[in-house]
Image: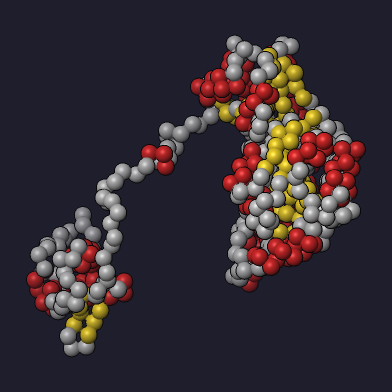
């Protein structure tokens, strides 16, 4: 054994050095298969270490399969086979796969993002209180694998909640809880024939568009008008599935009126194989009007798949979303995914149940509605004052973002680049146009203004920084 052991506080444990060196000799074929190793005592003497250190190293090599033992013969090198090398171990890591560390990545000072929420107003103390209650009262449930649809009791609470707030008609059995709407949609659509044409809103949520495209579906962007998804465009597309955001169209903010909703439901009813996926991503926030009932609440033919999330009302990082399936789709889902282990933390799900059942969720949403309404009004006033007639705001009193038109000679790309240079997180309509670049050629540029994560006392400064992009 031609190696030395380094002793002292600056080196790894003696047994680990012996183990590492012997493993290297075996992998490099310096120690041949079926070659006998020195006895523990002999190697200890040669290396001037304790027998226990050698014994510990041999036991680790034995456990990992590098050596085997034969009674009265000792330890012998195992025939482990050899790696097939297709390249050098020193081949560089591909540049396109490298990630920037936090110091190098873009960190905005101001965010107009539609994605974020205001975590400063989240009732963390209440959440921790219910979390502690779960730890004390639900240890048996926490020690078990979760139901593949989510705990039944949690689904009961969600079913009651969305019946009261959104008019959704369903049993707890119809609810699937997941760690994001995208993952739920992916699982659902994996059960459908890949040649089934799908219509999505244009402009619309590009994550769904890319997801469905990557799954191999023929996806047809259908333009939206002032009432939402065009029914004529939907009929022309030949689609069998339609993905819509009727309560607050994303990103334009349009609220689909009842006549268009009935047209959409009648389109689905014209064929038994048609389904509508209703993405109700931020319907909890309405300012000055009552909540608008969901499209699913009007469905009489069980052809609407309803999806909702707690990312906007609670925290995006909790990753709790849900999907309500019509019975026919539920049968297929259960058959395919009954062995699936997935979903959010069980601790968070049981905490959510108490959060809902004790009324804290409703109180929190009510408080945030009042808070966001005030913040939104302040932002709109500041924008109108600062831009002084150069902008038009699509003032739909709902959601956590709105659309703003500004007349400028800048291209969308130039706006986005200037925003980044000024450390502003800003999204333009360009991100959400799925087809038809002619929509981007208008001199009036459309900006998505999210306001949830703007600090109240920084709104004026944020608007002035935004205005500097266009000066």
Q: How many marks?
A: 0
The one nearer the camera, 68 or 389, is 68
Residue 285 appears in the rendering = no
Counting from the top left corner in percent of width and height, residue 249 is at: 76, 36
Counting from the top left corner in percent of width and height, residue 459 is at: 65, 24
Query: Is 51 on the left-hand or right-hand side of 353?
Result: left
Image quadrant where residue 115 sits:
top right
User: At 67% across and 15% down in the image, what residue appears?
Assistant: 443
Image quadrant where residue 110 sits:
top right
Counting from the top left corner in percent of width and height, residue 309 is at: 70, 48
User: At 61% across and 42% down in the image, what residue appears?
Assistant: 210
Query: Is 261 on the left-hand or right-hand side of 444?
Result: right
Q: By what rule are the colours in the image chosen?
A: secondary structure
The one nearer the camera, 107 or 149, is 149
User: At 75% across and 65% down in the image, what residue appears?
Assistant: 331
Quarter of the figure that contains the N terminus: bottom left
The one nearer the camera, 271 or 254, is 271
| Up-down relation of residue 292 to residue 337 (above or below) | above
User: At 29% across and 46% down in the image, what residue appears?
Assistant: 91
Counting from the top left corner in percent of width and height, residue 100 is at: 42, 37
Quarter of the figure that contains the C terminus: top right
| Up-down relation of residue 441 to residue 263 (above or below) | above
| Up-down relation of residue 90 to residue 188 (above or below) | above
Residue 86 appears in the rendering = yes
């Amino acid at each position: 054994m031609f190696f030395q052991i380094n002793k002292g506080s600056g080196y790894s444990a003696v047994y680990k050095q012996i183990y590492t060196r012997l493993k290297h000799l075996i992998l490099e074929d310096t120690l041949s298969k079926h070659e006998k190793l020195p006895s523990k005592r002999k190697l200890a003497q040669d290396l001037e270490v304790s027998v226990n250190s050698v014994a510990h190293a041999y036991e680790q090599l034995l456990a990992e399969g590098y050596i085997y033992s034969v009674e009265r013969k000792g330890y012998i090198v195992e025939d482990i086979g050899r790696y097939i090398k297709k390249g050098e171990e020193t081949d560089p890591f591909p540049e396109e796969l490298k990630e920037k560390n936090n110091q190098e990545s873009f960190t905005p000072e101001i965010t107009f993002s539609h994605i974020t929420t205001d975590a400063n107003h989240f009732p963390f103390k209440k959440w921790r209180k219910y979390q502690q209650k779960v730890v004390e009262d639900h240890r048996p449930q926490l020690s078990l694998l979760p139901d593949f649809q989510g705990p039944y009791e949690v689904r009961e609470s969600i079913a009651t909640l969305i019946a009261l707030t959104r008019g959704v008609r369903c049993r707890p059995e119809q609810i699937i809880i997941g760690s994001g709407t995208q993952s739920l949609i992916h699982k659902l659509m994996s059960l459908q024939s890949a040649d089934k044409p799908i219509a999505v809103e244009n402009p619309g949520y590009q994550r769904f568009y890319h997801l469905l495209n990557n799954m191999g579906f023929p996806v047809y962007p259908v333009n939206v008008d002032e009432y939402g998804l065009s029914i004529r465009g939907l009929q022309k597309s030949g689609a069998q599935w339609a993905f819509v955001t009727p309560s607050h169209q994303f990103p334009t903010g349009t609220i689909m009126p009842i006549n268009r909703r009935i047209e959409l439901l009648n389109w689905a009813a014209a064929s038994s194989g048609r389904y509508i996926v209703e993405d109700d991503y931020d319907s909890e926030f309405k300012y000055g009007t009552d909540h608008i009932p969901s499209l699913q609440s009007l469905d009489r033919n069980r052809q609407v798949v309803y999806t909702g999330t707690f990312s906007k009302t609670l925290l995006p990082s909790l990753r709790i979303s849900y999907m309500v399936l019509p019975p026919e789709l539920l049968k297929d889902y259960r058959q395919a995914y009954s062995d699936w282990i997935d979903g959010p933390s069980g601790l968070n799900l049981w905490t959510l149940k108490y959060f809902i059942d004790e009324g804290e969720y409703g109180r929190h949403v009510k408080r945030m509605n009042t808070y966001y309404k005030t913040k939104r009004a302040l932002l709109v006033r500041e924008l109108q004052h600062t831009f002084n007639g150069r902008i038009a705001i699509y003032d739909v009193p709902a959601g956590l973002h709105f659309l703003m038109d500004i007349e400028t000679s800048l291209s969308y790309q130039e706006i986005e680049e200037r925003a980044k240079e000024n450390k502003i997180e800003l999204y333009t309509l360009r991100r959400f146009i799925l087809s038809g670049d002619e929509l981007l050629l208008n001199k009036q540029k459309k900006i998505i203004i999210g306001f949830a994560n703007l600090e109240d006392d920084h709104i004026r400064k944020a608007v002035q920084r935004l205005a500097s992009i266009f000066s």
